[in-house]
Image (cartoon, rainbow, N blue to C red):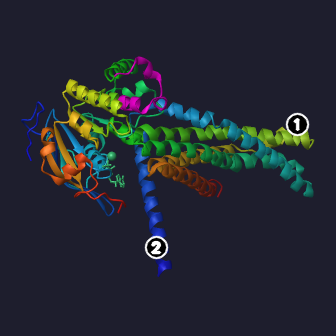
Amino acid sequence: MGFLSAIGRTTLGFLEALGKITLFTFMALSHCLRPPFYLRHIGRQMVEIGYYSLPVVGLTAVFTGMVLALQSYSGFSRFNAESAIATVVVLSITRELGPVLGGLMVAGRIGAAMAAELGTMRVTEQVDALTTLSTNPFKYLVAPRLIAGTAMLPLLVLVADIIGVFGGYLVAVYRLDFNASTYINSTWQYLEFMDVVSGLVKAACFGFVISLMGCYHGYNSRGGAQGVGAATTNAVVSASIMILVLNYLLTGIFFS
Amino acid sequence: MSLESSGNGAAGAPKISLRGVKKAFGPKVVLNGIDLDVMPGESLVIIGGSGTGKSVLLKCILGLLEPDAGRIFIDGEETTHLHGREREAVLRKFGMLFQGAALFDSLPVWENVGFGLIQGQGVGRREARERAIATLGAVGLAPEVADLFPSELSGGMQKRVGLARAICTRPDIIFFDEPTTGLDPIMSDVINDLIVQCVKDLGATALSITHDMASARKISDRIAMLHKGQLVWVGPTAEIDRSGNAFVDQFIHGRADGPIQMQIRAF
Ligand SMILES: Nc1ncnc2c1ncn2[C@@H]1O[C@H](COP(=O)(O)OP(=O)(O)O)[C@@H](O)[C@H]1O
Ligand SMILES: [Mg+2]
């Protein structure tokens, strides 16, 4: 009996959270679309998300590209397929690793920051103060973050794609003694427009999810510093899991 | 319990009116049927122990929390379940000083003070800055403070900035949630004087919360005492020492023994 009721309680809790998140999403989206728009805040968030995440995302991308080249070389040389390395690197980066690893790094950086900032504002009554000053917290706090997250992640991932491919190139040419122009040619040869676009669409979805989770957990945090800490953890964990699940679903849609 | 007040607008319809307001959080009943009228231009102070629901009462009136039962009227119009634009319109009448000041720590002081002007009334940033600095002057802060951030201010200065933010839009109704808690006695008195001065200048209706009796005596025309979710006594400030109410007597003399049993545990 205890076992069954535990399952029931968990299921109900899960459904309740799902309902709350859905409601929050619709509220937030409706505020993204209706004026007033806080352009100043959207701009500030874009800089925060896009510009200041560049080092982290760039570093992740360059090492991923380098490792990919090394790994595929040691694997592919077993059946004399070294010429496929450039293609493997560029396809893996643009279709999967750029968006997913970039998304996960940004989830750690931005999702946590948003949850901590909104959570602190919630527990110190700053969110209530906004409301009493006739400003809708959804419009003022949540909408700019959602818009900026969704808009900036594709740009970040585009940069990551380029840096990642460049990392692969560096290893291939300077460590594995590939011919530079041959490598560049085979990088372009099998790359399709859709590979890059699918990655960027994924990135936009991840950006939305990261901001959504950061805002949702921050906005609903309760009970002082501890509550803010929990909100931060929950934001990062839930955003990361949703990125992985969404990635599978989107890949299924794009390449089925 | 009389409704007369020494304020200037005792006659006529009440500014704020509560009827049977109830609010519970899960099993914990915080407000259990509150009836209260606040007249235009009067200053009412609600006293009561910590955790008796004083802040919850203010938040219900502001619409930050929705009461489970009962009705709330502002200027004779029911506002109990308003949302969205209608709520925003009602809130334009209000200024609120929060318990912890609740300043926006990402904005400089002047933008905090002018926030209601910029966001709520569409005043330009330049003009808002000038009016914010003027309001800072009214609460005794120098113009240099305007460009500091809230984290750079002492507790007393934060309270003053919070006060300036509450009055900058020249609201009809001002709420003060524990304006003197955490301040030394001298700074408390400075804040009390500022509150009295500002409320008088604006001709506003004031509803304050405190458990500091010196402050309550100084800023109020009438006092109401909240205990166990109900108002156990409401009367003019002058009569508080001869209220004949055991709860009030115990509270104003700060005695541990009496009808009020401090709850050691939350439930
Ligand atoms: N949002 C909330 N959720 C749950 N409980 C709350 C909430 N706000 C206040 N309470 C509870 O209501 C009671 C009254 O709180 P409050 O009005 O802040 O007391 P005070 O009279 O000291 O201002 C407290 O016990 C508090 O735990
Ligand atoms: Mg309180």
The residue nearer to you, when weighing B137 against A145, is: B137
Residue B25 or residue B91, whichever sits in front: B25
**Protein chain holding label 1:** A
Q: Chain of mark 2?
A: A
Q: Main secondary structure of the magenta part?
A: helix
Residues shaded magenta: B140-162
> Image point 24% across, 49% down: which residue?
B251
How far from the left and from the top, in percent, is residue A198?
Answer: 64, 47
Residue A70, horizontal then vertical, whole percent: 85, 49
Which is closer to the viewer, label 2 or label 1?
2
Give the quarter of the image for residue B77.
Answer: top left
Q: Return the residue nearer the eye: B83 or B96.
A: B96
Amino acid under disc 1: Ala
In the shown orientation, is residue B240 left or right of residue B92? left
Q: Nearer the viewer, residue A182 or B199?
A: B199
- Which residue has dot 2 on it? A8
Say which mark, if any, is on residue B254.
Answer: none
Which type of secondary structure does the marked residue at label 2 adopt? Answer: helix
In the depicted structure, whether residue A98 falls above or below residue B257: above
Q: Residue at x 45, y 70 (%)?
A: A9
Answer left or right for B28 relative to B36.
Answer: right
- Residue A31 picture location, percent across and down: 40, 41
* Residue drawn at 16 percent across, 34 percent down: B42
Tell me if I can see residue A188 in this picture.
no
- Disc 1 is placed on an element classified as helix
**Which residue matches tag 1?**
A180
Residue B215, x across and y down, in percent? 26, 36
Q: Is mark 1 within 8 Å of ligand 1?
A: no
What type is the residue that disc 2 sits on? Answer: Gly
Is residue B148 covered in magenta?
A: yes
Q: Earlier in the sequence, mark 2 or mark 1?
A: 2
